[in-house]
Amino acid sequence: MTNFRSEESMVPQGDDAFAGIADAEWTRVRHSPMLRAGKRAVDIAAALFFFCAFGWLFAILAVGVLITSGAPVLYSQPRYGRGGRIFKFYKFRSMLSNSAQILEEHLKNDPVARQQWAEYQKLENDPRITPFGKFIRKTSLDELPQFWNVLVGDMSLVGPRPCMLDQKSLYGSDWSFYCAVRPGITGLWQVSGRNQLSYKARVALDVAYVETLSVGRDIGIFIRTIWVVAVGHGSR
């Protein structure tokens, strides 16, 4: 998976990009080895099933991105993973190639958008998103490349939403909860309101998820995700 571009957020570079690795606070949140092994087994099985059963859909979406907005079809971005480790997070590209510059200019000139970004880290009308990108984001199909992240162990099927490098400070004292598990393709945030929720509410949901972690609850969240995606609830 090498056809990618880094975009969507103005990401810090250099030493700041690896600041999370030194964090040791996350170790105070522990889950049993059996629970971690069971959760990982489900992740591997789900990722393998996806690539075997829906590889054709992956190919169709890649062609769709290529036809509508050119190469690359994927983008990667550094995100925080378990223990504060940095990994490359993949999605189908849904934004223009100069999205970082577009975002910076848009926030500078639009105070309403600036306030919305500060509270939600999302925009109601995002000028960076392509027409085909709107479709794959609305249906969450842009997230499918993350099954690769799940297969290689960077992510889990269910967990906190992968945190951008410039969003770490928004977790405050709850950062240890985020770092206690692998981030997920879906999670409590996605089935509890998604983009309609403030980032503060998202953090609270991540804490609740980590505190009540179980394989059974993961399966329940995944089933709820199918319904949320089908009706488009909370998507933007």
Image (cartoon, helix red, strand yellow):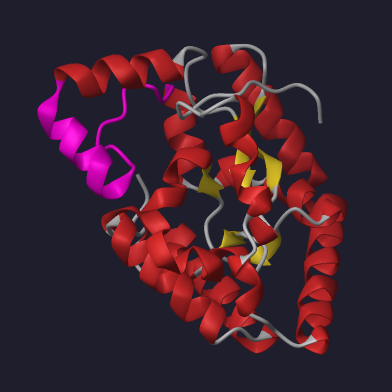
Instruction: For residue 217, say whether it is visible.
Output: yes
Q: Is residue 167 magenta?
A: no
The answer to whether 236 appears left or right of 51 in the picture is: left
Image quarter (top left, top right, bottom left or bottom right) of the C terminus:
top left
Image quarter (top left, top right, bottom left or bottom right) of the N terminus:
top right
- Figure check: 36 above or below 23: below
The x, y position of residue 234, in whole percent, is: 33, 56
The x, y position of residue 90, in whole percent, is: 67, 38
Which residue is rendered at x = 70% and y = 57% of the image?
Answer: 155
- Figure check: 4 above or below 123: above
Query: Which stretch did the figure color magenta?
Result: 110-130
Which residue is rendered at x = 20% and y = 41% of the image?
Answer: 116
Query: For residue 213, what is the image quadrant?
Result: bottom right
* Outermost residue, left side: 111
The x, y position of residue 166, in whole percent, is: 45, 39
The answer to whether 202 appears left or right of 59 in the picture is: left
Query: For residue 101, what is the image quadrant?
Result: top left
Which residue is rendered at x = 53% and y = 84% of the image?
Answer: 211
Instruction: For residue 226, say whether it is visible.
Output: no
- Figure check: 164 above or below 157: above
The answer to whether 185 appears left or right of 128 in the picture is: right
Which residue is rendered at x = 35% and y = 59% of the image?
Answer: 233
The x, y position of residue 231, in whole percent, is: 40, 60
Q: Nearer the viewer, residue 12 or 236?
A: 12
Q: How many marks?
A: 0
